[in-house]
């Protein structure tokens, strides 16, 4: 068998004219011009036009006549200039064509369920025939970019002295947030492994093991109800280091992201990123991952309305809440339908309603203005910089509710007004000083906001002692890009007693601690270095770098939004015998 290719399908140029070359690839298209057959031959790199002339080689031309889209062929021939006027400037090889002397059909193709080179909308079909979808330009481009980006990350972390270490996929189930995927053990009847939600405990144990600087491109598994654009398995860039400060981890991540954007997009991003505390982020943007490509900040009006007669404001302020507003500049023309939509949204996030003022023809149009004094109106106009055409939207409730509601409204208004689409800006920032604990009314107990290994701020340790759990801040940080959380991490608890105390606060009793976290507590007793780390979502990062619309577009074989792999039809039923070996009985009735 002679060789398959001397060049790839994007390589030949006018310099190669009169040379003999061999190409292999897929038939992208075939055109019959009165017995002369043209095919566009495609491989990973690009496309070359091949022409079969009956007068030059009758056999090859006859064989070419029978070619169909996606047949796999090898062609040997002479490189020739295209006839003047038939060049294709859109193709890298558009100035030349190959005049075929020999054609070998390596593999015949069935009629594909969709045209390969078209961006078809039916994603289910694309996922079912994913291998065909991967041949299309978009997916091929995205996977290539993902490779580049991952390589940039590996090179960067290697350069900084980080060791890439694999941690187990068959690991231990611990209650840490999401639901585990369980794997029954045949050798330990009745016992289960869990797939890791993240390598969190292992990476901390690596620090106790003296590894000092670890990273992993780690697959993580969470059995959650799939909200939009989530996958049951996803990839994190997982990092942990000993003897480091928060600032050192943050600048490591900044350098890494700068390297990624340089390598994958040729863009220089400014570092260091701005830092906002959680309280500021919530207070000003109503979000712990604020999108700062546009303003429309939340303004506190509690002082303006301190003596308000308006029942709704009065009620909020008297019960320790706040009054806040955003100014949607130029949105006075909002339709009744849109107001209704925003009001429903406000209610969904806990507000009782959504008060507003439209500034139209020099007048304030609003059902609530009649409750305001002239003084209040003047102060409001000034504070909100109200002008003709503006729409001011109010929230009055507990601080958290008000911030959250206006934060959601702010994002929706920005979407309606297309404030984000116009801007290609990359707004990176750190959100820091998250609360350590949050009380869950549903569970009737305190839960960790990040995870139970997160270190409290040193200055807030006394609050932990005195039981003022809601006020304790964490040494935790999230990195945000354009309103998307790219990742997060924290300094960890490295003292056994403090870790045990934290488990206690979270309602994990002593016995349970030994069963579930005995390995970690024991390890912390053998000389644990101070340590901390971070994890970044690689799929989401790649999506943003590629400009893709869904994380499925940057994953070779994703599940659909019902957690199903449409190509292999998994999950699937298994043989009764397999179950018996695992001591498992299915309770699902057929
Ligand atoms: N393991 C954490 C997570 O997956 C990140 C970290 O704290 O490093 O969210």
Image (cartoon, rainbow, N blue to C red):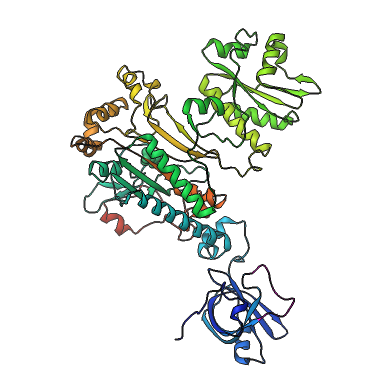
* Residue 454 figure quarter: top left
Q: Position of residue 39 (x, y in %)?
A: 63, 78
Within the displayed image, which quadrant is ligand 1 positioned in? top left
Nearer-the-camera pick, 102 or 297: 297
Nearer-the-camera pick, 298 or 345: 298
Q: Position of residue 484 (x, y in %)?
A: 52, 40
Most prominent secondary structure in the magenta stretch? loop
Nearer-the-camera pick, 346 or 480: 480
Which portion, as a residue range, is magenta?
81-91
For the point 34% across and 46% down, which residue is it? 196
- The answer to whether residue 557 of the structure is visible from this angle is no
Does 213 sit above or below residue 444?
below
In the shown orientation, is residue 459 left or right of residue 96? left
* Residue 405 figure quarter: top right
For the point 70% across and 86% down, which residue is it? 35
State yes or no: residue 178 in magenta.
no
In the shown orientation, is residue 145 left or right of residue 364? left
- The answer to whether residue 171 of the structure is visible from this angle is yes
Does 38 sit above or below residue 478?
below
Count all numbered tags in the image, as a single digit: 0
* Residue 31 figure quarter: bottom right
In the shown orientation, is residue 6 left or right of residue 332? left
Q: Position of residue 395 (x, y in %)?
A: 60, 21
Q: Position of residue 308 (x, y in %)?
A: 63, 9
Quadrant occupied by the N terminus: bottom left
């Amino acid at each position: 068998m002679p060789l398959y290719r001397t060049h790839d399908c994007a390589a030949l140029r006018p310099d190669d004219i009169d040379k003999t070359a061999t190409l292999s690839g897929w038939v992208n298209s075939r055109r019959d011009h009165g017995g002369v057959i043209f095919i566009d031959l495609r491989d990973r790199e690009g496309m070359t036009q091949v022409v079969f002339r009956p007068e030059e080689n009758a056999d090859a031309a006859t064989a070419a006549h029978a070619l169909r889209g996606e047949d796999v062929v090898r062609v040997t021939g002479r490189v020739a200039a295209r006839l003047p006027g038939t060049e294709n400037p859109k193709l890298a090889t558009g100035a030349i064509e190959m005049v075929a002397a020999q054609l070998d059909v390596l593999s015949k193709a069935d009629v594909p369920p969709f045209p390969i080179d078209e961006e078809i909308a039916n994603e289910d079909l694309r996922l079912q025939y994913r291998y065909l979808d991967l041949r299309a330009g978009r997916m091929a481009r995205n996977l290539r970019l993902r490779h580049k980006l991952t390589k940039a990350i590996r090179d960067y972390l290697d350069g900084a002295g980080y060791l890439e270490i694999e941690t187990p996929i068959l690991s231990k189930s611990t209650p840490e947030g999401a639901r585990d995927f369980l794997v029954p053990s045949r050798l330990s009847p009745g016992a289960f492994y869990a797939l890791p939600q993240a390598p969190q405990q292992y990476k901390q144990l690596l620090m106790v093991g003296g590894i000092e600087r670890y990273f992993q491109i780690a697959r993580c598994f969470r059995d959650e109800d799939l909200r939009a654009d989530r996958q049951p398995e996803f990839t994190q860039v997982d990092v942990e280091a000993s003897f480091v400060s928060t600032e050192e981890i943050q600048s490591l991540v900044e350098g890494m992201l700068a390297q990624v954007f340089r390598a994958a997009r040729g863009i220089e991003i400014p570092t260091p990123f701005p830092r906002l505390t959680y309280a500021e982020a919530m207070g000003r943007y109503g979000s712990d991952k604020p999108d700062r490509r546009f303003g429309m900040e939340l303004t506190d009006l509690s002082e303006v309305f301190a003596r308000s007669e308006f029942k709704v404001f009065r009620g909020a302020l008297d019960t320790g809440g706040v009054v806040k507003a955003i100014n949607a500049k130029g949105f006075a023309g909002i339709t009744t339908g849109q107001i209704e939509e925003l009001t429903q949204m406000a209610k969904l996030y806990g507000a009782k309603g959504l008060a507003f003022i439209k500034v139209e023809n020099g007048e304030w149009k609003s059902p609530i203005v009649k409750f305001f004094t002239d003084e209040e109106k003047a102060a409001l106009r000034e504070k909100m910089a109200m002008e003709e055409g503006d729409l001011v939207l109010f929230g009055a409730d507990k601080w958290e509710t008000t911030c959250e509601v206006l934060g959601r409204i702010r994002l929706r208004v920005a979407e309606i007004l297309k404030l984000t689409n116009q801007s290609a800006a990359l707004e990176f920032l750190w959100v820091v000083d998250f609360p350590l604990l949050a009380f869950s009314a549903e569970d009737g107990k305190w839960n960790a906001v990040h995870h139970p290994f997160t270190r409290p701020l040193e200055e807030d340790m006394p609050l932990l002692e005195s039981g003022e759990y809601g006020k304790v801040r964490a040494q935790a940080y999230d990195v945000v890009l354009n309103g998307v959380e790219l990742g997060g991490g924290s300094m960890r608890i490295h003292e056994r007693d403090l870790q045990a105390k934290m488990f206690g606060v979270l309602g994990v009793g002593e016995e349970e601690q030994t069963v579930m976290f005995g390995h970690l507590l024991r390890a912390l007793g053998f000389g644990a270095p101070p340590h901390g780390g971070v994890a970044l979502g690689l799929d989401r990062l790649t999506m943003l770098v590629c400009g893709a619309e869904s994380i499925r577009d940057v994953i070779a074989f994703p599940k659909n939004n019902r957690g199903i792999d449409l190509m292999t039809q998994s999950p699937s039923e298994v043989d009764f015998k397999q179950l018996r070996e695992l001591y498992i009985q299915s309770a699902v009735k057929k």
